[in-house]
């Protein structure tokens, strides 16, 4: 029997890696820290002393009040929330269904071609189809300025990546024996997917939900092309109202940025444990 030798990292090596990780963490969070402290200062203090922790006149909570009023925060928040929630929900359901079908019918030539085309579409930048897309939907069909249209566009642009991630997860983590046992018990294909397969996709679906929520919540380009009416503005579009031609209200901008970040941070805190596990499970085939 061969003796296995376990190599333990030295305490010095652990200390160096820990120090490097802490340094990178501080470097990454420094811009967020600047936004937070400057959201509680006057404009003149932000321009002259951006690194000062507290304004000379004290904490300027009025920036948040002004931001809420000027950007119509309640309406913008509702627009962002409704668009993000509906976009993510239909992506999770329909993409997982499509990925399941492609995996279980991978021997079909049509399935192979469809999956290959979806993967190829991921390499096409949005800017390539941006002008034709808006010209067709706005110039020919006149159906812009609609939250529903934006949700459908989000679904179309996000489908390929979601199917790719679900495809790898189903292929490597969900044995077909479970479905065969369900068939013996009398389950139909819809029951098998929604009662057996779909609950097992929780890790990868949580990962997709976080990634897509971040993308849709912070997206500026596509909503700016689709939503032209002020009452339909999402949070990124509403923050634009603080930018003037000759000057910018930095205090209100920082406060608005903090308010727009909070919902995504809360979502990440609740679902963070699924991110790494979902990505690894979807990428490694057992």
Image (cartoon, rainbow, N blue to C red):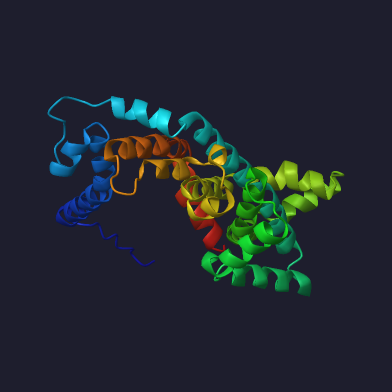
Occupied quadrant, residue 38:
top left
The structure residue drawn at horizontal position 21% and vertical position 33%, both measured from the top left corner, is 42
Viewer can see residue 108: no
The structure residue drawn at horizontal position 56% and vertical position 47%, both measured from the top left corner, is 228
Occupied quadrant, residue 47:
top left
Quadrant holding the N terminus: bottom left
Quadrant holding the C terminus: bottom right
Measured from the top left, where is residue 280 in percent x and y?
49, 57
Viewer can see residue 271: yes
Measured from the top left, where is residue 82 in percent x and y?
59, 37
Q: Nearer the viewer, residue 76 or 54?
A: 76
Q: Nearer the viewer, residue 268 or 77?
A: 77
Q: Residue furthest front?
A: 246
Measured from the top left, where is residue 133 in percent x and y?
63, 63
Q: Classify residue 24 as left or right of residue 109.
A: left
Measured from the top left, where is residue 207 in percent x and y?
52, 49
Q: Classify residue 36 as left or right of residue 57.
A: right
Q: Nearer the viewer, residue 220 or 210?
A: 220
Number of numbered discs overlaid on the protein picture = 0
The structure residue drawn at horizontal position 34% and vertical position 49%, both measured from the top left corner, is 245
Seen in the picture, residue 202 relative to 7 is either above or below; the reply is above
């Amino acid at each position: 029997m061969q003796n296995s030798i376990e190599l333990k990292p030295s305490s010095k090596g652990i200390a160096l890696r820990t120090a490097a990780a802490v340094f990178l963490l501080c470097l990454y969070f420094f811009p967020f820290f600047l936004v937070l402290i400057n959201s509680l200062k006057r404009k003149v203090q932000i321009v002259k002393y951006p690194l000062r922790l507290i304004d000379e006149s004290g904490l300027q909570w009025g920036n948040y009040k002004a931001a809420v009023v000027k950007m119509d925060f309640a309406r913008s928040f509702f627009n962002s929330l409704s668009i993000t929630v509906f976009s993510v929900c239909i992506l999770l359901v329909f993409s997982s269904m499509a990925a399941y079908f492609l995996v279980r019918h991978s021997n079909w030539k049509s399935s192979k071609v469809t999956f290959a085309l979806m993967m190829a579409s991921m390499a096409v930048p949005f800017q390539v189809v941006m002008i034709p897309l808006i010209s067709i939907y706005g110039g020919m069909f006149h159906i812009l300025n609609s939250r529903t249209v934006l949700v459908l566009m989000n679904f179309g642009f996000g489908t390929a990546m979601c199917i790719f991630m679900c495809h790898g997860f189903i292929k490597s983590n969900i044995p077909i024996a479970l479905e065969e046992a369900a068939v013996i018990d009398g389950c139909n294909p819809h029951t098998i997917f929604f009662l057996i397969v779909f609950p097992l996709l929780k890790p990868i679906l949580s990962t997709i939900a976080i990634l897509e929520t971040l993308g849709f919540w912070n997206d500026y380009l596509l909503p700016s092309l689709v939503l032209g009416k002020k009452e339909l503005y999402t949070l990124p579009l509403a923050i634009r109202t603080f930018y003037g031609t000759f000057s910018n209200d930095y205090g209100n901008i920082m406060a608005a940025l903090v308010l727009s970040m909070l919902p995504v941070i809360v979502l990440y805190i609740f679902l963070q444990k699924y991110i790494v596990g979902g990505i690894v499970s979807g990428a490694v085939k057992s």
